[in-house]
Image (cartoon, rainbow, N blue to C red):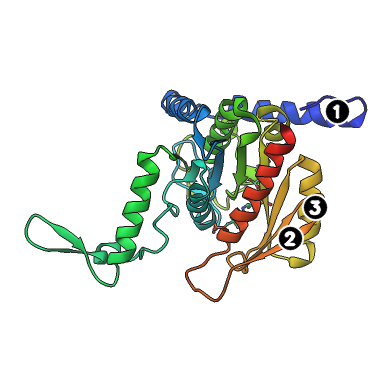
């Protein structure tokens, strides 16, 4: 973060310390060298890639909720509602718009290109034609063909790098790794932070190692506050990137005000404000100049709000790239 004199400098250094102590005390990522290799390959492939004469843009889409383990040998954890629909659907639209996507997602949540397949019972999508072959069964065959085809094109062109996380510790370490790796690509990188990130956690060192026993009566537990990493991402990890965060509230009265605050406090380029119950129908994109309401086109039930949302943000990102050069 930029250091300033006065109270801002104090806040900056206090936050820096909090962030550092979060990372120092987090359990190390088990597969960090594998992730780092994958990232290196992806960045190398796209650092000199061009689409219609323009350098390929890269977006890191975060998706799904982070968990907060209560025990080191985790039996119980705190979770949140996020299904990962927003991140998965947006990934498809970004790829359609020519982006290469790093999809940082919670294991077990919605995946790109699977939105029109039934979750339950998934196996009913298929049937045997004989002992050795299976085919997609009606009425799902078109959706299955489209999903497999679109997914294969994205993977074969190297446009989709999927990186799974489960805990808040994994998520924040991976976000930092991604941001510091793609930072060198400058303004053509976008962060689209749709993951629902835990605000409170149990620090690893004060966490029980074994399963907490119920015999000792009611559980009394103190949760620490997860330091907000948005300012570090924006100012230190990837300072030229175009950063979009999300603001979720259940009370519409405070939603836009909170989104405005986040925009200013963390220096985001835009904050997408959404309310829990209407999040699939409407969002508001808040920037320093305007508030744009984006709605799902209800004329076609297969349309979703991520289609116009991603189009709007892609336009804003292009303007950011043009301004930066
Ligand atoms: O997954 P779906 O079911 O489709 O739902 C989509 C969604 C509602 C989860 C998504 O649209 C959304 O709003 N995601 C952000 C939810 C959230 O965590 O809001 P928040 O107000 O708690 O956090 C605001 C921003 O700060 C987020 O961009 C988050 O990534 C970031 N954050 C939060 C906590 C923290 N300690 N550090 C952070 O950086």
How many other residues sit within 10 Å of disc 2, few (<14), some (14-19) or many (≥20)?
some
The picture places residue 154, in percent across and down from the top left corner, at 40, 45
What percent of the width, then of the height, locates residue 179? 60, 31
- Image-quadrant location for residue 267: top right
List the single residue furthest toward the front.
53
Check disc 1 and report its element: helix, strand or loop: helix
**Quadrant position of residue 291:** bottom right
* Picture disc at residue 10: 1
In the picture, the quarter occupied by the N terminus is top right
Q: Quadrant of residue 127?
A: bottom left
In the image, residue 89 sits, relative to residue 243, either above or below, namely below
Q: N-terminal of the two: label 2 or label 1? A: 1
Residue 112 vs residue 221, the one in the foreground: 112
81 or 157: nearer the eye? Answer: 157
Residue at image mark 2 = 292
Q: Which mark's residue is nearer the viewer, 2 or 1?
A: 2
Number of labels in the image equals 3
Residue 260 has which mark?
3
User: In the rendered structure, are the residues bearing label 2 and label 1 in contact, judged by CB atoms less than 8 Å apart?
Assistant: no
Ranked by sequence position, the earlier of labels 3 and 2 is 3
- On the rendered structure, is 246 left or right of 101? right
The residue lying toward the viewer, choosing from 234 and 202, is 234
């Amino acid at each position: 973060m930029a250091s300033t004199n006065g109270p801002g400098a104090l806040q900056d250094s206090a936050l820096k310390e909090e962030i550092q102590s979060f990372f120092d005390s987090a359990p190390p990522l088990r597969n960090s060298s594998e992730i780092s290799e994958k990232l290196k390959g992806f960045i190398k492939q796209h650092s000199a890639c061009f689409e219609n004469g323009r350098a390929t843009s890269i977006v890191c889409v975060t998706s799904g909720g982070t968990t907060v383990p209560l025990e080191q040998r985790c039996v119980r954890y705190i979770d949140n509602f996020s299904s990962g629909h927003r991140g998965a659907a947006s990934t498809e639209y970004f790829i359609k718009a020519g982006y290469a996507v790093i999809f940082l997602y919670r294991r077990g949540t919605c995946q790109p290109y699977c939105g029109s397949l039934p979750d339950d019972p998934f196996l009913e999508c298929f049937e045997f034609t004989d002992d050795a072959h299976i085919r997609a069964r009606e009425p799902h065959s078109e959706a299955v063909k489209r999903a497999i085809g679109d997914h294969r094109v994205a993977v074969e062109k190297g446009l989709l790098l999927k990186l799974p996380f489960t805990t808040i510790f994994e998520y924040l370490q991976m976000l930092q790794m991604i941001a510091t790796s793609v930072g060198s690509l400058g303004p053509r990188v976008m962060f689209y932070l749709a993951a629902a990130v835990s605000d409170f956690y149990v620090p690893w060192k004060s966490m029980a190692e074994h399963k907490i026993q119920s015999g000792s009566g009611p559980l009394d537990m103190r949760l620490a506050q997860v330091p907000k990493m948005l300012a570090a991402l924006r100012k230190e990890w990837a300072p030229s990137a175009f950063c979009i965060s999300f603001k979720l509230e259940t009370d519409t009265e405070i939603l836009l005000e909170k989104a405005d605050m986040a925009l200013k406090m963390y220096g985001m380029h835009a904050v997408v404000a959404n309310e829990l119950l209407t999040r699939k129908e409407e969002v508001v994109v808040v920037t320093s100049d305007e508030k744009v309401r984006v709605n799902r086109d209800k004329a076609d039930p297969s349309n979703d709000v991520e289609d116009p949302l991603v189009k709007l943000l892609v336009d804003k990102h292009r303007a950011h790239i043009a301004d930066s050069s």
